[in-house]
Amino acid sequence: VVLKHVDVFEGQADSEVVHAKYVIGGDGAHSWVRKAFDIEMEGEQTDYVWGVVDMIPDTDFPDIRNKCAIHSNHGSCMLIPREDDKVRLYIQLGSSEPVGITSGRVDKDQMGPEQLLNVARKSMAPYTIKQPKSIDWWTIYRTRSYSVDNRVFIAGDACHTHSPKAAWKLVHVIRGWAKPLLLQTYELERRKYAQDLIDFDKKFAKMFSGKIQSAENHDGISVAEFTNAFSKFSSFTSGISICYQESAIVYSRHQAVARGLVIGMRVPAQQLTRVADGRQFEVQNLLLSDTRFKVLVFTGDVSDATQKVKVNKLVADMGASDGFLRRYSHGGNIFAAFDIISIASSNDNIRYIDVPDLLRSHWSKFYVDRPTRTGGGNAYEKYGVQLTGAVVIIRPDGYVGAIAPFDCVADLNAYFGGIGK
């Protein structure tokens, strides 16, 4: 790839050639990467055009800090609270907005963030939105799906879909842990979800632009129907409704071992108590997006002598030279590729030194399913894990990849052997 420098110092070359094994195009809706590599825009686009604005609002609208949809005679918009006092506005644009005849795109020279806010103001009247001090980000888009080469990837607005992250897959391939075939799962998983999103977007956009059922409008959308659709939209945008199909990184053989942890989906929320200091933690806060696989070991009651023998055997199998921990990390630092978190069943007398070293690489890695005033204490029941224990593999993107009982570590070896070098 030839890169052209915008600001060139005297005596410096104005361009350079970069050789790369992989390219990620996260360069916006009019992606140069997509065009340069001639990535075809497969599939269909909806007739609905959406504007999006992120800003810190100055408004008298009373529900500005709540997720809500606004229907009015002047149009519709949706409000999503965000971090750092920001709010995202989704604004559906009408067919009268300036759309290019040949491109089918909204002309951004005629439709920018100020014009988008004017459309939103009409929907929110009689409430007002003052002109913000700054616009954090804005865009206009239609939903499409796109094909992706196994070495050139497009993400974000470049493919106009809420794509799963490719970063962790690239990291594992580049570090030499995984085979390049891992990258094929990016397109496999993205395509189905993108198509589901497109299908739902068409339905939701039609509902969103319609009128709510009332005495004057008997054929309108019922509040219950719209509420259900809005809830489903939230599930799409948060990713909690995604369920990836069987693949090299989704292995569903032992689903019965933990029925509440659906393989291919995210881990449901649950509070756990850290053994060493008694502090409560939400399990999602333990599953950091740091490119590492999370290995959740449900140890059962380790104060029971019989169960402790089973746990020790599990540790020996997992940590063996031919076990997945060492083979996948090529005998190096296993904690560079894996984060092991242990969860014991409820017991008031348990100590953090009651599990083998591998299951507590740090004092903060051992938790107990203990009842708390804020709702903990039912993780084993909620996740469908028996007191005999289970091992749950959480992919670096937070989705359950595989589950196995203690005596089936060989299946986990095969799981990582399929993608590992």
Image (spheres, rainbow, N blue to C red):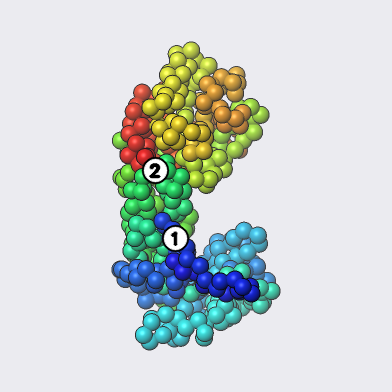
In which quadrant of the rendered view does residue 124 lie? bottom right
Residue 344 locus on image (x, y percent): 52, 26
Q: Which residue is rendered at x = 38% and y = 81% of the image?
A: 104
Q: Which mark is residue 128?
A: none
In the rendered image of this protein, does residue 269 appear above or below residue 121? above
Give the position of the C terminus as an image quadrant: top left
Amino acid type at mark 1: His
- Taking depth in this image into account, of 196 and 145 the one nearest to the observer is 145
Give the position of the N terminus as an image quadrant: bottom left
Q: Which residue is mark 2?
A: 178
Q: Which residue is rendered at x = 46% and y = 69% of the image?
A: 2
Is residue 351 found left or right of 94 in the rendered image? right
In the rendered image of this protein, does residue 345 appear above or below residue 167? above
Is residue 301 found left or right of 349 in the rendered image? left
In this rendering, the label closer to the viewer, 1 or 2: 1
In the rendered image of this protein, does residue 151 appear above or below residue 373? below
- Taking depth in this image into account, of 149 and 85 the one nearest to the observer is 149
Q: Which mark is residue 19?
A: 1
In which quadrant of the rendered view does residue 119 lie? bottom right
Looking at this view, name the residue that lies furthest to the front: 11
Residue 97 locus on image (x, y percent): 46, 84
Q: Which residue is rendered at x = 50% and y = 81% of the image?
A: 108
- Taking depth in this image into account, of 389 and 204 the one nearest to the observer is 389
Q: Secondary structure at mark 1?
A: loop
Amino acid type at mark 2: Ala
How far apart are the alpha carbons under marks 1 and 2?
21 Å
Looking at this view, name the residue that lies furthest to the top: 305
Q: Dot 2: within a 10 Å radius of its alpha carbon, few (fewer than 14), some, or many (20 or more) residues?
A: many
